Image: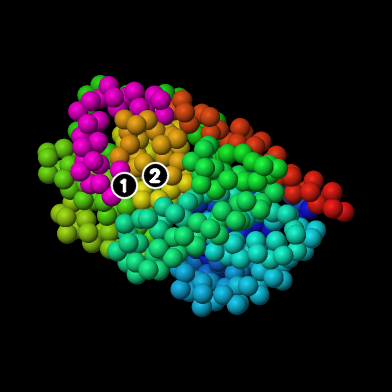
Amino acid sequence: MEAILILTHRFQRDRNGNVFTINHVESNLIWDRYLKVFTHLTVLARIQEVEEEVDERFLISQKNISFVAIPYFVGPKEFIKNYFKINKTLAKLIRRDRAYICRLPNMSGNLLIKHLRRKNIPYVVELVADPWDVYSAGSLKKSMNPFFLTFNKYRSLFTLRKSVRNAKGVIYVTEYILQKRYPAQKKAITTHASNVVLKKKSFSNKPLELSTPPNVFKICSIGSLEQLYKSPDIVLKAIKKIRDLGKNVQLTWLGGGFHKSSMIQLSKELEISEAVFFKGNVSPEVVFQELENSHLYLQASRTEGLPRAVIEAMAKGLPCIGTRIGGIPELLDEEALIDKDNIDQLVNKVIYFLDNLNALNRQAKKNLEKARTYQYEILEKRREDVYRCLILKKSDKE
């Protein structure tokens, strides 16, 4: 059976028709989870046509995968502008002999679900984030009209609840946080599984253990800079304060996007550019190398589902600091949590771990143990059970 997967991620396609990820978000291992259950996978996504050569490390090379381009848009305004074109594209793909998997939140995904529900075609939802937190993020409060912010916040809440409630199967990235706000119907098949891909070789043999403070304390953060959801502005201001207190810390940020240049400029204005390194989009191999060279991982997100970058850092035996957002409290101890958009809390938490190496080492050990529960082989079995419900449901109808 063919599966249709609709994503919110954006891809690039070169003049030869090759499709590339914009970053390492969708590695080839991720596609395997679908091809273990379905004979062919068609991916619906926004695809940007490019003339220049693209890094071959991001080439999607698997067999039995094809792409259908959704009319390209960025943000709600462009979605509305292209609404009828997007709707027409999705309507053409509705067939009863296909399985449909919708990764949400996703404006195009909600539109696809409307078509599926009209024809009583079952679908599975992969719920990876909470739009309620997105519209509560400080960056949006500053940039969006208060009326439209409130309207979109409640509209997104209602729409996503409806999409999840009518799904035949739901895969949550969190163990309990998203389930509370977006419950599935009682007869639905549900599970929780992060999108992280961690093979046995991804894990460190032992956690980080420091007996004395390093000469340079290296902090790593990972996140797209298309939006400010990962709070790079907050992180930079915190780094400035920490260095002003005499602590020799460095920050490496992995991930590119629209705001990369403005964040580089901010680091210059704060006079910390010599201690901050924006490395853009990098391969999974580089991600793990950077984590191995770090002493602390930082996730100061304004909105999250269950951040796989945190789990990747935990798998490398790193202590982590994160915000009390989404599924982060499921991963980290209260000792390692801070409030979003709170520079002083972030500064104090980093200083706390710098001055209390026993606490730092304790968190590193706990994180490595916790990360082992997210091993690839364990999570894949859960997902497969949910995907197979689409085959069973369709067989029942035939």
Q: Residue at x 58, y 45 (%)?
A: 183
Q: Position of residue 368 (x, y in %)?
A: 44, 28
Q: Which residue has dot 1 on it?
A: 340
Q: Is residue 251 above or below residue 103?
A: above
Task: Name the element at disc 2.
Answer: loop
The earlier-in-sequence mark between 1 and 2 is 2
The answer to whether marks 1 and 2 mark residues whose Cβ atoms lie closer than 8 Å is: yes
Q: Which stretch appears magenta?
A: 339-367
- What residue sits 38% from the left and 60% below the top? 227
Q: Amino acid at mark 1?
A: Lys
Q: Which residue is most to the right?
A: 398
Does the magenta-highlighted stretch encompass residue 355? yes
394 left or right of 274?
right
Amino acid of disc 2: Ile
Observer able to see residue 281: no
Residue 90 in the image: above or below residue 397: below
- 115 magenta-colored: no
Q: Main secondary structure of the magenta part?
A: helix
Residue 325 is labelled as 2
Q: Residue at x 29, y 24 (%)?
A: 359
Res 241 quadrant in image: top left
The foreground one among 67 and 228 is 228
Q: Disc 1 on helix, strand or loop?
A: loop
Which quarter of the figure has residue 111?
bottom right
Mark 1: give few (<14), some (14-19) or many (20+) Cα within 10 Å: many
Q: Nearer the viewer, residue 291 or 190?
A: 190
Task: Report x, y in % for residue 218.
Answer: 27, 39
Q: Could you tell whether 232 is left or right of 175 in the image?
A: left
Q: Is residue 160 above or below residue 91?
A: above
